[in-house]
């Protein structure tokens, strides 16, 4: 083999290695392993066809090395983090779940953290006050209560008056009990809208002056359900879709102020959002009391009673480790160049992608084979 062929083979090896190296932290999941394999194959294929077309090997090798170099530059830009010192972040919904872990992580990284909690005397808030987190302050903050938002705002203003607030993470959210849209009481739609959407709007409006001062960031925690129509998730999905669209509009509007807006769309993590067995029993009683007699007749009591137990099933099927979400939240807050949208979790990227690419009829057919959350069927289906 002559020198220039050797050079092109080495260049191909270097570029395959570069691809694997840049994707290294994502190779844990099957999709990324497959993507790495496909990319390596494509590179080797490109080299093969170059040689086949009689392009001089030295040119192929140089082209591959240039691509690797660009890939490294782009990746490094993405990975580079801002210093944590003198940055303050407010996170809502820190009693449990993502918010709780994020607040601890940010405080360990040396940021000043204002952790908003629904219940300042609750167990979650107590755990945040444990020693070792001196730069973390727990604040009573029910995001649906304007006076609590004002109080938190005054408190934070007094502390960060000179530097401003670097980040606001609109994380507080409720799922309630997923069920058929026809059966879902209007009050439940209202609850989802209030906590998941209107509260985030209010929070953003109140805190934007502080965020503009530091040219900081808003991170809105939405959901895959905002983009993908999932049966039983009409109320939650609609509230998150409203949040997602507002975030996208705000991203454009705030770019002139240098404020970044980032959306996190997780899917399938085991947190308190699915409630406990008490919650499930309570939902069952509430639904049975709220449904109309026609609906009770057509769907049947067995079906309606089975709906809340879907929560425990979903919880069991969800991933226990929430660190992919928290990693993405940290990246969104501190990366030099945050991405506009992050999609941690199984299917969180794939399903929205398919939804955008497939004709509606095809995607609907795909959704119908996604596992169902109840074994029961509406009673009336068998009659007609
Ligand atoms: N888990 C997932 O797979 C998943 C998927 C997509 C999106 N998300 C979103 O991720 C966010 C965090 O959820 P999570 O999974 O970490 O669930 P979580 O453990 O229930 O965390 C949500 C937190 O928000 C709090 N909260 C509820 N209502 C509030 C209010 N009015 N004011 C202030 N705080 C309030 C909750 O307090 P209590 O614990 O006292 O109720 C809880 O601490 C939510 O916006 C959720 O919609 C989660
Ligand atoms: C986050 O969502 C809220 C509610 O939809 C919206 O008002 C706010 O502008 C969003 N934040 C950003 C930075 O887009
Ligand atoms: C679930 O029940 C617990 C008490 O067992 C309560 O503190 C909590 O607020 C309930 N969660 C929801 C979402 O209703």
Image: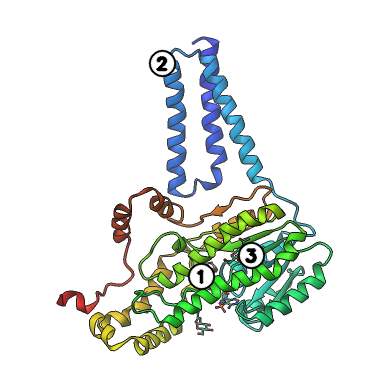
**Residue pointed to by mark 2:** 52
* Quarter where residue 67 is shown: top right
Mark 3 vs mark 1, foreground winner is 3
Alpha-carbon distance for marks 2 and 3? 53 Å
The answer to whether mark 1 is within 8 Å of ligand 1 is yes
Q: Give me the residue at 54% from left, 76% from top.
A: 194
Alpha-carbon distance for marks 1 and 2? 54 Å
Q: Give me the residue at 54% from left, 25% from top.
A: 64
Alpha-carbon distance for marks 3 and 1? 17 Å
Q: Is residue 34 above or below residue 103?
A: above
Which sits earlier in the primary sequence, circle 3 or circle 1? 3
Q: Could you tell me residue 321's position as x and y percent?
A: 52, 62
Secondary element type, mark 3: strand
**Residue pointed to by mark 1:** 271
Which sits earlier in the primary sequence, circle 2 or circle 3? 2
Task: Name the residue nearer the viewer: 62 or 108.
Answer: 62
Q: Residue furthest top?
A: 2
Residue 169's label in the rendered image is: 3
Q: Could you tell me residue 147's position as x and y percent?
A: 68, 82
């Amino acid at each position: 083999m002559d020198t220039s062929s050797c050079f092109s083979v080495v260049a191909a090896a270097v570029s395959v290695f570069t691809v694997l190296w840049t994707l290294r932290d994502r190779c844990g999941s099957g999709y990324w392993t497959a993507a790495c394999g496909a990319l390596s194959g494509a590179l080797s294929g490109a080299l093969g066809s170059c040689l086949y077309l009689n392009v001089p090997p030295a040119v192929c090798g140089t082209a591959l090395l240039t691509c690797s170099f660009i890939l490294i530059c782009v990746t490094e830009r993405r990975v580079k983090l801002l210093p944590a010192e003198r940055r303050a972040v407010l996170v809502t919904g820190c009693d449990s779940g993502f918010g709780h872990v994020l607040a601890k992580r940010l405080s360990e990284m040396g940021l000043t953290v204002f952790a908003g909690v629904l219940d300042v005397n609750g167990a979650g808030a107590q755990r945040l006050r444990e020693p070792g987190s001196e730069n973390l302050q727990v604040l009573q903050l029910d995001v649906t209560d304007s006076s609590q938002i004002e109080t938190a705002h005054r408190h934070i203003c007094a502390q960060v008056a000179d530097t401003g607030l670097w980040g606001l993470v609109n994380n507080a959210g409720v799922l309630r009990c997923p069920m058929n849209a026809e059966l879902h009481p209007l009050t439940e739609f209202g609850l989802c809208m209030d906590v998941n959407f209107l509260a985030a709007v209010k929070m953003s409006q109140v805190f934007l002056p502080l965020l503009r001062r530091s040219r900081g960031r808003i991170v809105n925690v939405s959901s895959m359900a905002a983009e993908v129509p999932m049966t039983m998730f009409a109320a939650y999905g609609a509230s998150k879709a409203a949040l997602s669209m507002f975030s996208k509009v705000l991203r454009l509007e705030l770019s002139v102020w240098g404020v970044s807006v980032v959306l996190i769309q997780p899917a399938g993590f085991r947190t308190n959002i699915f409630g406990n067995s008490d919650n499930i029993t309570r939902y069952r009683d509430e639904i049975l009391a709220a449904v109309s007699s026609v609906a009770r007749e057509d769907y049947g009591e067995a079906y309606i009673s089975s709906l809340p137990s879907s929560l425990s099933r979903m919880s069991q099927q969800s991933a226990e480790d929430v660190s992919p979400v928290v990693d993405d939240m940290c990246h969104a807050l501190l990366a030099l160049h945050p991405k506009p949208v992050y999609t941690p979790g199984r299917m969180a990227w794939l399903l929205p992608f398919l939804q955008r690419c497939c004709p509606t009829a095809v995607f609907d057919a795909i959704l119908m084979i996604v596992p169902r959350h109840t074994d029961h069927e509406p009673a009336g289906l068998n009659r007609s």
